[in-house]
Image: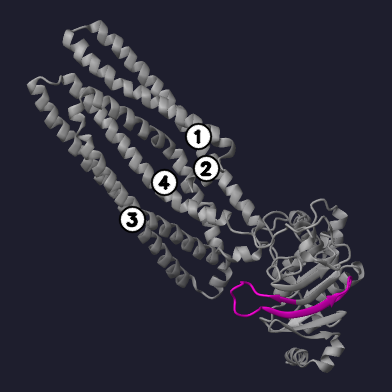
C-alpha cells in the first residue's frame, strides 16, 4: 500500500530524499551537543578551564545553528513533497474518474468520490508534510542515542531493555484497535458530504416543501455520527501519549535512582549522568515521534486504501479492440440485444431488442415510465455496454470504434440538462471549442434558443451561474440542444429534452431539425405523442421490450399500448 501511494510522488521523489538527508544530518549534529556538554562539565567546569569552556561552547553553538538550518530545509522539502504527492494523487484519481463508465460511477456514491479526492488525499499529504521529519529523525536519533548511551554506561542503559518492549506492546495494542476506527471515521465523512450534496442540489425542492427542519435533523444525525466516530478514534489515539509519558517518567526515575547510587560509590561522574540523561530524553522523544508516526501512518493507510479502490477500479468499457475508424453515416442496428446493469442481476433491463434505424431517419421512442427508454439510447454511445447481442453503427460493432470518435459522432442531450459555471458562449463551445460566431448563432436558431438570448443582459456573454441557475428549465433545454448540434454529430439523441418547452416551440425546433439537418439521424425520446407523431418510425417500449414499431398511423391502428398512451393524453388535453 505504502509503495503504491509513493509511486505517485513522480517528480517530487527528489524532495523526499533531500528532506530525509536534511533530517539525518540534523539529528547527527543534535546528537553531538550532549557529548560536548558532558565534556564542558567534566573537563572545563571541573578543572576551571575557561578557554576550554568557550571553545566547546562555540562548537555547541555551531552544531545548533547547522541543525536549525537543516531543520528548516527538511521542513521546506517535506512540504513540497507532501503537497506534490497530494496533487499527483488527486490528478490520478480525477483522470481515472474521467475513464469511468456510468456503471463504474454507480459503484461509488458521488459524495464518497469527493471525500476520497479531498479528505483522504489531505490525510496522506499532511502525513508527508508533517511526518517526514519525525519519521526520519526518530529512528536515527533512537539508534544513535542508544549506542552513545550504552557507550557512556552499559549497566545504566540496561533500563531501556525494559522500557522499550513495554512501549512497543502499548503501541501495538493502540494501533491494532484504532485502525478500523479511522476507516469508520472516513465513511462517516462520506455520509456528511452526501447529505450536504443532496440538500444543496435540491435546495429549491427543500424550500418548496418546507422541509428545512427535517433536513437539519437529518444532517444532525450524520454529523453526530461523525463526531462519535472521530471521538472514539482520537480518544484511543491519545492514550498513546499517556503510555509514552508513563514509560518516559518511569525510565527517568529509574536512571536517577540507579545513577545516583553509582555516583555515590564513585563508578560514575556527574557529567556522565547529565549527558546520559540528555540522551535518555532524546531516546524517549524519538520513541514518541515514532509512535506518533505509526498513528499517522495508520490513518493514512485507511485513506490510502480508499484512494486505491478508485485507482484500481476496473474500467468495464474498454477500447482494447478498437480500430482507427469513424462513424460516417449514422445507421444504427440492434440485433437481439440484452442488457442489465449488473452481471449478477436476476432480470434484464432490456430484452431481445431488434431495431434498425436508417441514416438520416427521425425515430421516436415512447413508453410508460420505467420502460428503459433512456437505457436503450445510452447503449449507442457506449455509456453502458450491452450484455449480449450485437449493436452496430454503419454495420460495424460499436466496440470497434474508439470511444472519442464514437461519442463525438453521437450527441446525447440527457434528461437532466446540465450547464456549467461560465458564460453562455463558453457552455455552447463545449459542443465545438473552435466554432465560429455564425455557427453558434445557427445552432441556437435551430434549437430555438435565439428567441431568448437576445433578451439577456449580455447576450452570449451572460454568466450562467452554477448549474445554469440564471435561465429557466425550457431555456436550459434549448441551450443543451444547441450545444449538441454544434458537435455536428451523425446521430442526435434527444432524451425527453423538450419537456419544459411549450408545444409551439417544440414544433418549431422539430421543424428546424428536419429542415436544417436532414442527413443527421435523430432519435427522440418523449412522453408526449405530439413530440414524435411526425417521426419516420416510432418505437414502443414496455418493460424493456419492443412492443411495436411503425408510423403514428400504423401504431394507432394496431398497437394497444400506443393507443392507450394516445388516448390518455387526448383525454388530458380535452380536460
Per the image, the residue denoted by label 1 is 16
The answer for how far apart the CA atoms under marks 3 and 4 are is: 14 Å
Which residue corresponds to mark 3? 177
| Stretch of the chain drawn in magenta | 337-362
Residue on which the image places disc 2: 6
Examine the rendering and report whether any part of residue 538 can be seen: yes
Of 339 and 533, the residue lying toward us: 339
Which quadrant holds residue 322?
Answer: bottom right
Taking the image as shown, residue 473 lies to the left or right of residue 158, namely: right
Secondary structure beneath dot 2 equals helix
**Residue at the left extreme of this rendering:** 265
Q: Pointers 1 and 2 in contact (CB under 8 A)?
A: yes
Tell me the crowding category of disc 1: few under 14, some 14 to 19, or many 20 or more residues within 10 angstroms, Cα based. many
Mark 4 lies on a secondary structure that is helix
- Mark 1 or mark 4: whose residue is earlier in sequence: 1
Q: CA distance from mark 1 to mark 3?
A: 30 Å
Q: Residues within 10 Å of mark 2 (few under 14, many from 20)?
A: few
How far apart are labels 1 and 4 at the CA level?
A: 16 Å
Q: Are marks 1 and 3 in contact (CB under 8 Å)?
A: no
| Disc 1 and disc 4 in contact, CB within 8 angstroms | no
Q: Is residue 272 above or below residue 571?
A: above
Residue at point 14%, 27% (across, down): 259
**In the drawing, what numbered circle is on residue 25?**
none
Report the disc number at residue 297.
4
Split into 4 quadrants, where in the image is the C terminus? bottom right
Amino acid at each position: 500500500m505504502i509503495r503504491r501511494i509513493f509511486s505517485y510522488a513522480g517528480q517530487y521523489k527528489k524532495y523526499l530524499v533531500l528532506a530525509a538527508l536534511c533530517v539525518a544530518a540534523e539529528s547527527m549534529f543534535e546528537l553531538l551537543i550532549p557529548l560536548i556538554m558532558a565534556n564542558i562539565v567534566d573537563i572545563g567546569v571541573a578543572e576551571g578551564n575557561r578557554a576550554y569552556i568557550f571553545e566547546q561552547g562555540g562548537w555547541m553553538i555551531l552544531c545548533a545553528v547547522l541543525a536549525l538550518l537543516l531543520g528548516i530545509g527538511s521542513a521546506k522539502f517535506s512540504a513540497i513533497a507532501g503537497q506534490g504527492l497530494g496533487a499527483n494523487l488527486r490528478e490520478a484519481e480525477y483522470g481515472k474518474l474521467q475513464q469511468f463508465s456510468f456503471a463504474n460511477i454507480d459503484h461509488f456514491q458521488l459524495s464518497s468520490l469527493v471525500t476520497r479526492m479531498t479528505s483522504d488525499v489531505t490525510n496522506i499529504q499532511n502525513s508527508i508534510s508533517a511526518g517526514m521529519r519525525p519519521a526520519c529523525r526518530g529512528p536515527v536519533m533512537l539508534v544513535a542515542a542508544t549506542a552513545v548511551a550504552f557507550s557512556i554506561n552499559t549497566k545504566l542503559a540496561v533500563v531501556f531493555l525494559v522500557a522499550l518492549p513495554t512501549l512497543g506492546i502499548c503501541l501495538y495494542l493502540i494501533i491494532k484497535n484504532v485502525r478500523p476506527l479511522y476507516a469508520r471515521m472516513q465513511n462517516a465523512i462520506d455520509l456528511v458530504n452526501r447529505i450536504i450534496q443532496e440538500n444543496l442540489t435540491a435546495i429549491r425542492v427543500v424550500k418548496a416543501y418546507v422541509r428545512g427542519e427535517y433536513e437539519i435533523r437529518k444532517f444532525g444525525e450524520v454529523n453526530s455520527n461523525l463526531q462519535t466516530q472521530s471521538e472514539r478514534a482520537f480518544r484511543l489515539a491519545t492514550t498513546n501519549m499517556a503510555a509514552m509519558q508513563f514509560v518516559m517518567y518511569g525510565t527517568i526515575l529509574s536512571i536517577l535512582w540507579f545513577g545516583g547510587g553509582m555516583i555515590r560509590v564513585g563508578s560514575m561522574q556527574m557529567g556522565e549522568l547529565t549527558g546520559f540523561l540528555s540522551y535518555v530524553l532524546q531516546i524517549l522523544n524519538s520513541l514518541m515521534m515514532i509512535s506518533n508516526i505509526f498513528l499517522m501512518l495508520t490513518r493514512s493507510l485507511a485513506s490510502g486504501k480508499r484512494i486505491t479502490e478508485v485507482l484500481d477500479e476496473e474500467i468495464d468499457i474498454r477500447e482494447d479492440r478498437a480500430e482507427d475508424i469513424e462513424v460516417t453515416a449514422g445507421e444504427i442496428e440492434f440485433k437481439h440485444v440484452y442488457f442489465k446493469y449488473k452481471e449478477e442481476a436476476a432480470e434484464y433491463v432490456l430484452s431481445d431488442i431488434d431495431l434498425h434505424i436508417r441514416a438520416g431517419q427521425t425515430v421516436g421512442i415512447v413508453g410508460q415510465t420505467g420502460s428503459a427508454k433512456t437505457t436503450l439510447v445510452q447503449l449507442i454511445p457506449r455509456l453502458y455496454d450491452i450484455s449480449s447481442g450485437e449493436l452496430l453503427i454503419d454495420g460495424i460493432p460499436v466496440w470497434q470504434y474508439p470511444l472519442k470518435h464514437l461519442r463525438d459522432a453521437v450527441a446525447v442531450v440527457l434528461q437532466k440538462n446540465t450547464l456549467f459555471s461560465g458564460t453562455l458562449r463558453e457552455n455552447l463551445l463545449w459542443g465545438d471549442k473552435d466554432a465560429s460566431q455564425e455557427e453558434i448563432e445557427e445552432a441556437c436558431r435551430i434549437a430555438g434558443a435565439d428567441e431568448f438570448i437576445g433578451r439577456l443582459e449580455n447576450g452570449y456573454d451572460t454568466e450562467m451561474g452554477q448549474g445554469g441557475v440564471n435561465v429557466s428549465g425550457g431555456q436550459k433545454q434549448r441551450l443543451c440542444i444547441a450545444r449538441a448540434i454544434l458537435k455536428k454529430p451523425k446521430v442526435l439523441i434527444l432524451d425527453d429534452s423538450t419537456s419544459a418547452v411549450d408545444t409551439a416551440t417544440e414544433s418549431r425546433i422539430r421543424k428546424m431539425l428536419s429542415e436544417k439537418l436532414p442527413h443527421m439521424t435523430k432519435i427522440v425520446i418523449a412522453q408526449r405523442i405530439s413530440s414524435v407523431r411526425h417521426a419516420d418510425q416510432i418505437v414502443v417500449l414496455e418493460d424493456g421490450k419492443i412492443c411495436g414499431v411503425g408510423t403514428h398511423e400504423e401504431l394507432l391502428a394496431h398497437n394497444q399500448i400506443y393507443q392507450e398512451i394516445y388516448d390518455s393524453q387526448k383525454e388530458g388535453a380535452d380536460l
